[in-house]
Image (tube, rainbow, N blue to C red):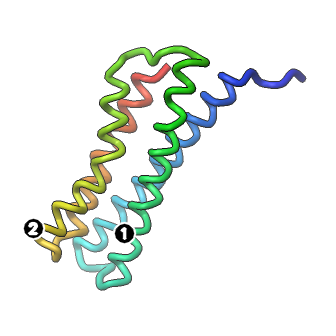
Amino acid sequence: MAAMPAGAALSQVHAWLAVAAAIVAAAIVVLGALDAVRLFTGTSARRWLDRALLVLLAVVAAAAVLGPFVLVLVGPPREWLHLVYAAAALAAAPVARAIAAARAPSRMGGWVAVGGLVTLAALLRLWGTGG
């Protein structure tokens, strides 16, 4: 069996990072919703939300770093809006967390859950506009 070309391997890693981001974003939605309905509260809940946000940032950033290499080795995405959706996936949940901290810390879970949903929507569009 022949080895996979570098571009194809990179493309696979890029896609698997997107799957990992979707899993983490879904976990953020669940944790945020549990915090919003007061089933998972306190400083422990906030720490888990913040940890999940950091993991999401790391995974989406890793996929974004691989993006230019996929562009060079494989080719451009089907639509250039792919870049806009990538930025939305990277920023939505952390921005929602920042808004919640500035406005209503008691409603942080709800804000973060909405940010996770926006991230999931952006990831869905990323899969639709990728190569």
Residue 130 in percent (x, y) is at 45, 23
Say which of marks 2 and 1 sits in front.
2
The answer to whether 98 is drawn above or below residue 19 in the figure is below
In the figure, is residue 124 to the left or right of 42?
right
The residue nearer to you, when weighing 61 against 29, is 61
Q: Position of residue 61 (x, y in %)?
A: 46, 45
SS for callout 1: helix
| Frontmost residue, 40 versus 55 | 55
Alpha-carbon span between mark 2 and mark 1:
17 Å
Q: Secondary structure at mark 2?
A: helix
Of the numbered discs 2 and 1, the one sitting upstream in the chain is 1
Residue 126 spot, x, y in % from top left: 40, 31
Disc 2 marks a residue whose amino acid type is Arg
The image quadrant where one finds the N terminus is top right
| Label placed on residue 49 | 1
Q: Is residue 38 left or right of residue 17?
A: left
Residue at left offset 38%, top offset 35% = 124
Residue 127 percent coordinates (x, y): 44, 29
In the image as oriented, which residue stretches furthest toward the right? 1
Image check: 111 left or right of 4? Answer: left
Determine which residue is flagged by label 2.
103
How many numbered badges does the structure rendering display? Answer: 2
Q: Amino acid at mark 1?
A: Leu
Q: Which residue is nearer to you in this view: 64 or 36?
A: 64
Q: For mark 2, does the 10 Å Cα neighbourhood hold few (<14), some (14 to 19), or many (20 or more) residues?
A: few
Q: Residue at x 32, y 22 (%)?
A: 81
Up/down of 123 relative to 44, above or below: above
